[in-house]
Each structure stands twice: as C-alpha cells, then as structure tokens.
Image (cartoon, rainbow, N blue to C red):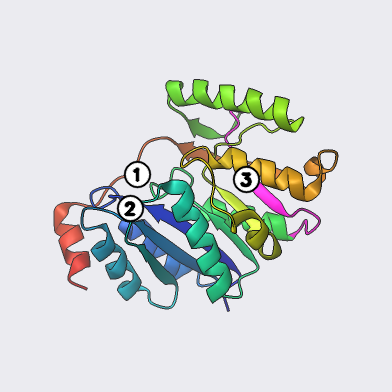
Amino acid sequence: MKNYGIVIPCYNEENRLPYQEFIDFAQNNQEVLLCFVNDGSKDNTLALLNALKAAQPEHIDVLDLEKNGGKAEAVRQGMLHVFRNSNVKLIGFLDADLATCAEEWLEMAKYKEKLPQYGAIVGSRIQRLGASILRDDNRSMFSKMVKTFIRVILKTTFQDTQCGAKIFARDLVPFLFKTPFMTPWLFDIEISLRLQKKFGKTTLQKGVLEYPLMNCTSSYNAWLSLKNRLLLLSL
C-alpha cells in the first residue's frame, strides 16, 4: 500500500544522480512510490533509471519522455502519471540532486497528514539556528527577487517559493497540473498562482503550509564511482 508519491525530474543525470541513496530510500520506505521522469536525456540517464527500477520494481517507476520539455513539463507529466496510475494520497516532487533529501520530504508529508485542512505543503529554506541550509549566493539573490515578486502579486508572506520540495493533496493534482506551464523553470510561481486561484486571495495562507527544512544544499551529493554505476547497469 503506497501512501506517498515522489516525482523526480531527470535530464542528463548519468554522472550525478545519487543512485544508491534512492535505492536505500525505496527499500527502507516501502509506503513511498518514487517516479523518475526522464526528460528526453541525451546521455544514459534512461538506462540508469531503468536499472533503478529493476533494483526496486515495487517501489520505483520510470516515465520516459522522448522529447526534452524542461523541468516544468517533466514535473507536470510525472504528477499526472502518478495520479492516474496509483492511489497515493499525497503527491509531490523533489530535485534529482537530493538538495532536499527524500527522508525530509517524507517528514513533510507525514506532518501534512496531521493537518488535513491544508491542501499543500512546501519546503522552505529558512536560515535559522540548528538548520543546515547551504545556498549559492547568486541563487539566493534571485530567490529574494522572486520572493518579493510573489509577495506583491499574491499578497502573501511566502518565505521560499523556489524550493524543489513540494507536496499536494491528491485531489489538487488535476487542477494544478492539467494545463502546461508557461515557463520551463519558474513554474513554482505559476503553481502559487494556481493555488491562489483555487483557494482565493484572502484564504491562500489557510490552504498552503510552509515547512522549514532542517537540511538543504545547492550542490550535488556524493556521486557513485564509475565502477559502481557500471555495476548498477548490470543489475
């Protein structure tokens, strides 16, 4: 019985995907379905994703998009795929580099379950005592600009709209992801606008919950050696 679905968009991840971490997570958290979306990669990403699926066939799914459409479209297609092909209650997405680890995504999901009045929960990379939030300065500056824009447009106090960890109640998925996004990379803003349309300008803060992350990094985790990647392909 799967309660949670995580969509992971992948483009040319052959040399940087933390394969073993995903395998370990799938094995240790069997209530979670991992859906990897190959976004028209030009390297051997698809073969590696299929190897992951072969290693954990009950817990890992692979959606192959032949044409590269950008992260927004990969996430959208993955969210709809999980919605249509499973009965999971909460569906969200996560960056392939595990800047936010899958374990913390799952903690977010279980926290959301305790507060069913919220339709969505989003990770927030807030610098604070006790948390390890490592962010690139240029990305941080861009994020501040986006945050200011969102606050003006949505009239909300979102602390972080660009975090790659987000989770939605199942019934929200068709509404939020049925229509393609206008931008391939700033689709987080469009999701916020669609949430506003769903909940209304005055009640958006009552429908969406921000979750302060404990750990987040802008760099990729340790990668497997070429020997280990070849071993995985041979499975």
Amino acid on which the number 1 mark rests in the picture: Asn
Amino acid on which the number 3 mark rests in the picture: Ile
The quarter of the image holding the N terminus is bottom right
Disc on the earlier residue, 3 or 1: 3
Q: Is residue 10 left or right of residue 175?
A: left
Residue 118 falls within the magenta-colored stretch: yes
What's the residue at 79%, 41% (across, down)? 205
Amino acid on which the number 2 mark rests in the picture: Pro
Pointer 2 local density, CA inside 10 Å: few below 14, some 14–19, many at least 20:
some
User: What numbered label is drawn on residue 64?
Assistant: none
Q: Can you identify the residue that label 1 sits on?
A: 221
What's the residue at 77%, 53% (across, down)? 118
Q: Can you identify the residue that label 3 sits on?
A: 191
Disc on the earlier residue, 3 or 2: 2
User: What numbered label is drawn on residue 18?
Assistant: 2
What's the residue at 57%, 41% (across, down)? 188
Q: Nearer the viewer, mark 3 or mark 1?
A: 3
Q: Nearer the viewer, mark 3 or mark 2?
A: 3
Figure quadrant of residue 107? bottom right
Magenta region: 114-128
